[in-house]
Image: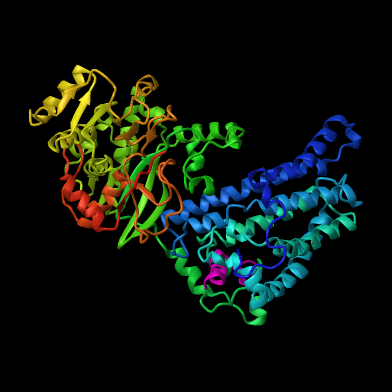
C-alpha cells in the first residue's frame, strides 16, 4: 500500500478474494456459447479469443517469474543482491488483477465498439500503426506521466506502492494501485483504439501488442541481465530504442533516473539517464554463477508440490501447504511437470539465502516421494545425489546437508555410501540427525515420564530413545522385535527404561514413517503426536495434537527468506536437518555427520542457539 493511499487505490473486486475470477465468468461463458452455436459466418473470433489471451498472459507472466527466480538463485548475471522477503510476496500476490481489468475492458469494447468485433487474424497496416503509435505518443506520454508520479503528492498516494520493491521480480512491473493502472491502460489504449476506430484492427495487432507490453515489463523487472552488449555495438541507435533489465533496475535503486517505459530515448533527451547505466550493464553480464558455502539437498514430495516450490507459484510457496481447488483443474500441466521431472536427471537450484558470511543454496532433486519407495528407482536417485555432492565439492562448498528422504538407510545408509565411494571429499556431508534429536528432546514436555515410540526405527529414533532412557524417561514399544533392536543398539545401557507396552495408554507418542490410521485411532483422546521423521504423519485425529517435524525458528538475520520449507513448515521456520548443515559450516567442524556417526547433541543444540536459531513453542495443531 502507498504511504498515504489516494482515491481508487484498492481494486473494486478486492472483497471477493480468490473468487474474483467470477467477474469474468458471464463474459467467458457467453463468448464460448456464441462461438459454439452460431453459424460459421456469424462467429466472432476476437470475442472468443479474449479468454485464451487472458490465460496466455497469466502463463507468460508465470514463465518469467519461474525463470527470474531460478536465475537469481543461481547468481549468474544477477543485478541487485538485496533480499526479497515475505512482505514483498504478500504485496505482489495480486499481480493478476490487471489481467482481469484488461479482460473486462476487452469484453466491453468488443460488445460496444464498432470495429472491435469480427476482426481478422492479421492486417499489416494495423500492425504498423500499432508499432508507430507506441514508439511515438505512448512512450513520450508515459515518460512524463512517470515523472509526474514521482512528484511527492502522487508518489506518496500511488507510486510509492510500486517502489516498495527495491529488488524487483517480473510481477513487480504490474503492482500498482487501481487508479494508476487506469492511467496506464489509457495510454496503452491509444494504439489499440486507433486501429479499432480506423478499421485496421486485427487479432495479431491487439494480442501481439499486449504480449509485447508483458514481455518488456517482465524483462525490465526480472533482476538478471540477458541483453548482450554486442547488440549495442553492432547497432548503436538500439540503446535509445530498447531498455535493458539493468537500465530499469537503476530506477528502483536510484528513484530519480531512467523514467522511460521501454525506450530510453526520452531519458537521453531530457538528461535523466543514470550515469552508471552502461557500467552496470557490463558488470552484470560478467557476473558468474554463485558458489555456495552450504547446500541443502531436498526433493519434490507430491505431484502438486511443484507449484509450492519457490520457482512455482510465489504466493503458494510463501504459505504452509493447503489444498487449493484450482490446482485440481491444472492436472494436465501437473502431469506434464511430472513427466519432465522424471526425464530430467539433475538437481536444480530453487533458493539462495545469506546468513552471517555464508552463502546458502537449496537444490532440489526432480524426484517425488513415491519414487523413493520404488526399489528400481534407488540406483537412479543415488546417482543424482552423488552427482550433486561431487558438484558441490567441485564448487568449494563447505557443507551439503541431506534433506527429506535423501538420507534413507535403505537408500544410502544415511549418506555413508557416498563417503565410501569418495573418501577424499572436502565438502562435509551432514544428515543433521544430532540436531534433530536435540530438537525432539526439547519438544517433549518436562513432566513426561513415559512415551510410546511408534513407526519406522531410524537412526534418529534410536538416538532419541537412548537419550530419553538415559534421562530417566521410559520409552515403550509394542512389538518384541522393535524392543530387541533398540536394546541391542543401546549395548544394555538403558537400564529398565526401555519397556514393552501392552496398551496404547501413553499421552506422548513419538512417531515416524509408517504410522497407520489404525494405530492412531488407538491413542487416547488428547494424545500429542511428535514426529521424528522428516515427513509429517497424516492427521487422522481431530481430538489430538500434532507437532510439526523437528524444526527451529530462524534468526531475522537470515536473508532472502520468502518461501516456506517443505510445504508444511510455517514462515521463517527451518527443518533441523537443514539448520544442522548451516551450524556445521558456521562452527567449522571438520567431521562428516552421516552413516551411523552422530555428533554430540548437546554441543549441536548449544551451537544452534548461539547462532540465533530458536526453539518453537508448542507449534502443533
Quadrant where the N terminus sits is: bottom right
Which residues make up the magenta segment?
234-253
How many labels sit on residues? 0
* Residue farthest along the bottom direction in this orientation: 271
**Is 617 colored magenta in this rendering?**
no
Residue at image position (70%, 60%) is 178
Left or right of residue 116: residue 580: left
Quadrant where the C terminus sits is: top left
Q: Does residue 322 lie above or below 507 as drawn?
A: below
Whether residue 486 is visible, yes or no, is: no
Q: Main secondary structure of the magenta part?
A: helix
- Residue 336 position within the rendered picture, expressed as x and y whole percent measured from the top left: 54, 33
- Residue 477 position within the rendered picture, expressed as x and y whole percent measured from the top left: 22, 23
Whether residue 252 is visible, yes or no, is: yes
Left or right of residue 486: residue 284: right
**Is 248 colored magenta in this rendering?**
yes
- Residue 242 position within the rendered picture, expressed as x and y whole percent measured from the top left: 63, 66
User: Coloring scheme of the render?
Assistant: rainbow
Q: Quarter-wise, where is residue 158 in the image?
A: bottom right
Left or right of residue 144: residue 582: left
- Residue 302 position within the rendered picture, expressed as x and y whole percent measured from the top left: 46, 33
Residue at image position (60%, 65%) is 161
Q: Quarter-wise, where is residue 25 in the image?
A: top right
Q: Does residue 416 lie above or below 219 as drawn?
A: above
Amino acid at each position: 500500500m502507498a504511504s498515504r493511499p489516494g482515491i481508487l487505490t484498492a481494486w473494486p473486486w478486492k472483497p471477493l478474494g480468490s473468487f474474483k475470477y467470477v467477474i469474468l465468468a458471464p463474459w467467458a461463458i457467453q463468448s464460448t456459447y456464441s462461438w459454439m452455436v452460431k453459424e460459421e459466418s456469424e462467429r466472432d473470433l476476437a470475442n472468443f479469443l479474449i479468454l485464451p489471451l487472458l490465460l496466455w498472459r497469466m502463463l507468460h507472466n508465470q514463465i518469467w517469474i519461474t525463470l527470474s527466480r531460478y536465475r537469481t538463485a543461481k547468481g549468474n548475471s544477477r543485478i541487485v543482491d538485496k533480499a526479497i522477503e515475505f512482505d514483498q510476496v504478500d504485496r505482489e500476490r495480486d499481480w493478476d488483477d490487471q489481467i482481469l481489468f484488461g479482460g473486462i475492458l476487452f469484453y466491453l469494447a468488443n460488445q460496444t465498439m464498432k470495429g472491435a468485433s469480427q476482426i481478422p487474424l492479421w492486417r499489416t497496416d494495423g500492425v504498423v500503426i500499432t508499432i508507430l503509435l507506441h514508439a511515438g505518443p505512448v512512450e513520450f506520454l508515459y515518460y512524463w506521466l512517470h515523472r509526474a508520479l514521482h512528484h511527492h503528492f502522487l508518489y506518496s498516494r500511488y507510486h510509492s506502492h510500486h517502489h516498495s520493491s527495491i529488488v524487483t521480480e517480473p510481477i513487480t512491473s504490474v503492482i500498482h494501485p487501481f487508479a494508476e493502472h487506469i492511467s496506464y491502460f489509457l495510454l496503452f489504449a491509444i494504439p489499440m483504439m486507433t486501429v479499432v476506430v480506423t478499421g485496421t484492427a486485427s487479432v495479431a495487432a491487439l494480442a501481439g501488442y499486449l504480449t509485447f507490453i508483458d514481455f518488456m515489463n517482465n524483462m525490465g523487472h526480472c533482476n538478471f541481465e540477458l541483453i548482450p552488449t554486442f547488440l549495442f555495438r553492432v547497432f548503436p541507435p538500439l540503446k535509445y530504442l530498447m531498455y535493458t533489465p539493468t537500465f530499469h533496475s537503476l530506477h528502483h535503486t536510484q528513484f530519480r533516473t531512467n523514467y522511460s517505459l521501454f525506450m530510453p530515448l526520452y531519458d537521453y533527451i531530457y538528461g535523466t539517464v543514470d550515469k552508471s547505466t552502461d557500467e552496470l550493464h557490463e558488470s552484470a553480464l560478467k557476473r558468474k554463477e554463485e558458489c555456495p558455502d552450504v547446500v541443502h539437498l531436498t526433493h519434490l514430495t507430491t505431484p502438486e508440490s511443484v507449484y509450492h516450490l519457490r520457482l512455482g507459484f510465489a504466493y503458494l510457496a510463501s504459505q504452509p501447504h493447503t489444498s487449493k481447488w484450482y490446482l485440481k483443474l491444472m492436472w494436465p500441466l501437473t502431469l506434464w511437470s511430472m513427466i519432465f521431472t522424471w526425464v530430467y536427471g539433475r538437481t536444480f537450484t530453487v533458493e539462495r539465502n545469506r546468513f552471517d558470511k555464508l552463502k546458502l543454496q537449496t537444490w532440489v532433486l526432480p524426484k517425488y516421494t513415491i519414487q523413493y519407495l520404488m526399489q528400481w528407482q534407488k540406483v537412479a536417485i543415488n546417482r543424482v545425489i552423488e552427482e550433486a555432492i561431487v558438484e558441490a565439492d567441485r564448487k568449494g562448498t563447505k557443507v551439503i546437508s541431506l534433506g527429506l528422504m535423501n538420507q534413507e538407510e535403505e537408500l544410502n545408509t544415511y549418506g555413508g555410501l557416498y563417503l565410501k565411494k569418495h573418501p577424499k571429499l572436502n565438502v562435509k556431508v551432514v544428515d543433521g540427525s544430532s540436531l534433530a534429536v536435540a530438537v525432539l528432546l526439547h519438544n517433549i514436555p518436562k513432566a513426561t515420564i513415559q512415551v510410546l515410540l511408534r513407526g519406522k526405527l531410524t537412526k534418529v529414533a534410536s538416538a532419541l530413545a537412548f537419550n530419553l532412557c538415559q534421562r530417566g524417561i521410559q520409552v515403550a514399544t509394542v512389538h518384541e522385535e522393535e524392543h530387541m533392536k533398540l536394546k541391542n543398539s543401546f549395548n544394555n545401557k538403558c537400564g529398565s527404561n526401555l519397556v514393552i507396552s501392552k496398551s496404547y495408554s501413553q499421552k506422548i507418542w513419538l512417531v515416524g514413517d509408517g504410522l497407520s490410521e489404525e494405530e492412531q485411532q488407538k491413542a487416547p483422546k488428547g494424545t500429542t503426536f511428535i514426529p521424528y521423521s522428516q515427513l509429517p504423519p497424516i492427521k487422522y485425529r481431530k481430538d489430538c495434537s500434532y507437532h510439526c517435524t523437528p524444526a527451529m525458528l530462524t534468526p531475522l538475520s537470515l536473508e532472502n527468506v520468502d518461501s516456506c520449507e517443505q510445504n508444511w513448515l510455517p514462515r521463517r521456520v527451518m527443518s533441523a536437518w537443514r539448520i544442522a548443515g548451516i551450524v556445521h559450516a558456521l562452527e567449522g567442524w571438520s567431521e562428516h555427520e552421516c552413516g551411523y556417526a552422530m555428533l554430540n547433541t548437546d554441543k549441536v543444540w548449544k551451537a544452534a542457539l548461539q547462532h540465533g536459531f530458536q526453539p518453537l513453542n508448542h507449534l502443533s495443531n
